[in-house]
Amino acid sequence: MITNSIYGLTFEQLAAWLLEHGHKQYRASQVWDYLYRKRVKDFSEMTEVNKDCTALLEENFVIHTLSHHVKQEASDGTVKFLFKLQDGNLIETVLMRHKYGLSVCVTTQVGCNIGCSFCASGLLTKTRDLTSGEIVEQIMNVQHHLDDAGNGEKVSHIVVMGIGEPFDNFENMVNFLQIIIDQKGLAIGSRHITVSTSGIVNKIYEFADTNIPVNLAISLHAPNNELRTKIMKINRAYPLEKLMDSINYYIEKTNRRITIEYILLKDVNDHIEEANELAALFHDKKKKVYINLIPYNPVDEHSQYQRSAQESVLAFYDTLKKNGINCKIRQEHGTDIDAACGQLRSKQIRKEKGDIVSR
């Protein structure tokens, strides 16, 4: 039986639920503090909350819906977690260490239907959306991992860039954001949170209208319709003209900068010609756009794609800079483990089905 995660409630929802069930609203502050500040792992540890209340919570919610299935640790400190959900599905979550803090990359769906031709996440089609509680719990599991190490470290940054398309699970994703930025709880700074989308145009408009002050990243990966349609089938539904209109709306509505993500694929989208096209595409948005050039992590099932040569990456970068475009080459994490998003999950599922032999 699938049970409800207590982490799926915003503070306001929890307070309203407790009031509806005959408890004072101040109980919500106590419970919230135990969950996110004291980070208890069982309702019985909420010793300042009366037993009637904790019994009610235990009857209706659970704290743990995810279990650790596989954990990989890289030499650079990156940790990739493969969690098993209550229904047996597997998802990935990644902890990355940066100079500016500890970042967690969360998953929003079991599988992905976007079908980008180079991506490991879409090797297994979408089974279902994650609940907001399952998304929050990924962060809590990573934080508990850090707490157990006893070094006083805390998750400081969130990227919603794991398996799945966040804007295809819009409601749960927005609820998740409201929970993690709440100052009474985890209090993750909104400027430290980035949500990535492959370009579901109508949801970009809707996201702009929410006024949630987090960062938005667009997975672009090609500067023209012909090439983008070839490697990202979503471009058939939302061609660049429509995507650029939604980007313009987002910038005008929020006055925030957008990050453009661009994975460099050898002899596909890494030529000087594409660099100049990309620069031209954002020529009038130089102050509001930041381009993230991403070295490709090869995926066995997508052998037609290879990592761009270092000289091609640098030439692409130099071309953008010469055109006045703000850009950087993304620092890599976890290169000595299953680095590509979705790779560990796909490999583990195939292994458990007996399709591959563990190395």
Image (spheres, rainbow, N blue to C red):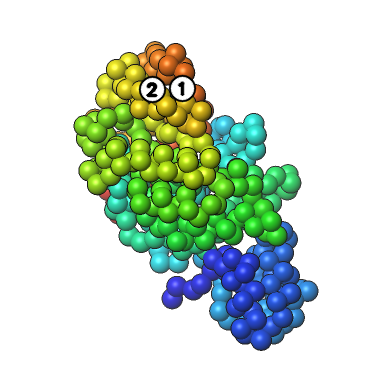
Residue 15 visible to the viewer: yes
In this view, the residue farthest toward the front is: 252
In the rendered image, the vertical position of residue 21 relative to residue 302, given as above or below? below
In which image quadrant can residue 141 be found? Answer: bottom right
Residue 69: in sight, yes or no? no
Q: Amino acid at mark 1?
A: Ile
Number of marks present in the image shown: 2
Which residue is drawn at the image coordinates 40% and 67% (left, top)? 87
Residue pictured at 53% horizontal, 40% vertical: 255
Check disc 1: other Cα within 10 Å, few if <14, some if 14-19, many if 20+: many
Picture coordinates of residue 104 (x, y %)?
55, 45
Pointer 2 residue: 279
Q: Residues within 10 Å of mark 2 (few under 14, many from 20)?
A: many
Q: Pick whichever, 274 or 242, lies toward us.
A: 242
Q: Are marks 2 and 1 in contact (CB under 8 Å)?
A: yes
The answer to whether 230 appears left or right of 154 in the picture is: left
Residue at 34% of width from left, 32% of height from top?
A: 221
| Most foreground residue, 157 or 289 | 289
State the residue position of label 1: 325
State the residue at coordinates (59%, 65%): 10
Image coordinates of residue 185 in percent, x first then y, are: 68, 59
